[in-house]
Amino acid sequence: MKFQPSQCFGVIALLLVSLSLTAQETPSIYINYQDVEPGQTVDIDVLVSNYNDIVTSAFAVTWDSMMLRYVGVDNIAFDLSEDDNFNAMNATGGELTYLYFDSSLSGNTLDDEGVLFTLQLEVIGAEGEQTVIDFGGLMEVVDTSEADLEALFLGGIITIGEINSTSITTDSRLQAEVSPNPFSEAANVIIELNEGGEISWTLSEISGQRIMDGKTFFGPGSNVLKLENTLFKHTGAYILQLQMGDVSITRRLLYMAP
């Protein structure tokens, strides 16, 4: 069944009045950073976390149409369709609207880091440029019992050009993963080393403002650098850079204030 935006927004208003309120962890909808090449058609996953028993999601994805050209959408969750659940009227200008409504009111759930849909864009910007894919529009998420979940929407940065060793590397000498991510209490940075050595690390806000840095010696094998939530000023995205000799890797952290 196809829903027009005006019909769905009317139902959303009814839900705000009729649904009882219970607490739920704040959902997040986000886009990971990506390095791309000029002329490439890239898949940009719109990911979720704490996306449980959701009845309605509405938002727009926006991008610079001088850097990226709309191709289409794919990998759409809940058996939704491009024709029924997306408005691509302004896609040539850099905006795609997504609207999902579960008419059964039973709600749908996606696992953490699950893909809500994949945005396909052609890279038309020049080598060495950066651009942001962000969120706008109504930006509303409603579950089976909550009027307004105040979801966290986090855009991603797209870098056009070859991956540089000063930003990201797959060098086996230094590997790192962050768990959990997103997080509320603490982030555990799991560092894998072939050989022991000193690692310099820097934690920054997404704006580039440095929060903290340090140097720590880690032995070979698996090590953990624990970042407590007291380091993070507010809900949002943060950047952690790890440096060991000439090898450097960057990881994005998503902090949600408890």
Image (cartoon, rainbow, N blue to C red):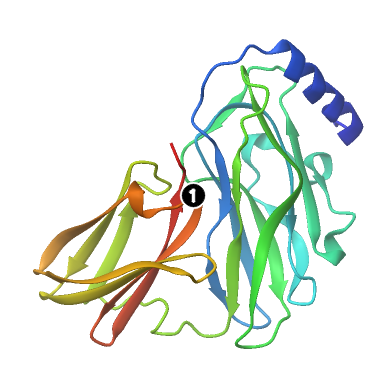
Image quadrant holding the C terminus, namely top left
Residue 163: horizontal and vertical position, in percent?
47, 82
Seen from the viewer's position, the closer of residues 155 and 42 is 155
* Residue at the spot 60% in from the left edge and 71% down from the top edge: 158
Q: Residues within 10 Å of mark 1 (few under 14, many from 20)?
A: few
Q: Residue 73's image quarter?
A: bottom right
Asked whether residue 1 is in view, the answer is: no
The answer to whether residue 37 is left or right of residue 88 is left
| Residue underneath mark 1 | 234
Residue 189: horizontal and vertical position, in percent?
28, 57
Up the image or down, 224 lies above or below 53; here it is below
Up the image or down, 10 lies above or below 150; here it is above
Residue 176: horizontal and vertical position, in percent?
29, 64
The answer to whether residue 25 is left or right of residue 190 is right
The answer to whether residue 255 is left or right of residue 46 is left
Image quadrant holding the N terminus, namely top right
* Residue at the spot 33% in from the left edge and 55% down from the top edge: 178
Residue 19: horizontal and vertical position, in percent?
68, 13
Q: Amino acid at mark 1?
A: His
Q: Residue 133's image quarter?
A: bottom right
Q: Residue 28's image quarter?
A: top right
Element under label 1? loop
Q: How many marks?
A: 1
* Residue at the spot 68% in from the left edge and 22% down from the top edge: 147
Asked whether residue 188 is in view, the answer is: yes
* Residue at the spot 63% in from the left edge and 83% down from the top edge: 129
Up the image or down, 49 lies above or below 208; here it is above
Seen from the viewer's position, the closer of residues 16 and 123 is 16
Up the image or down, 175 lies above or below 136; here it is below
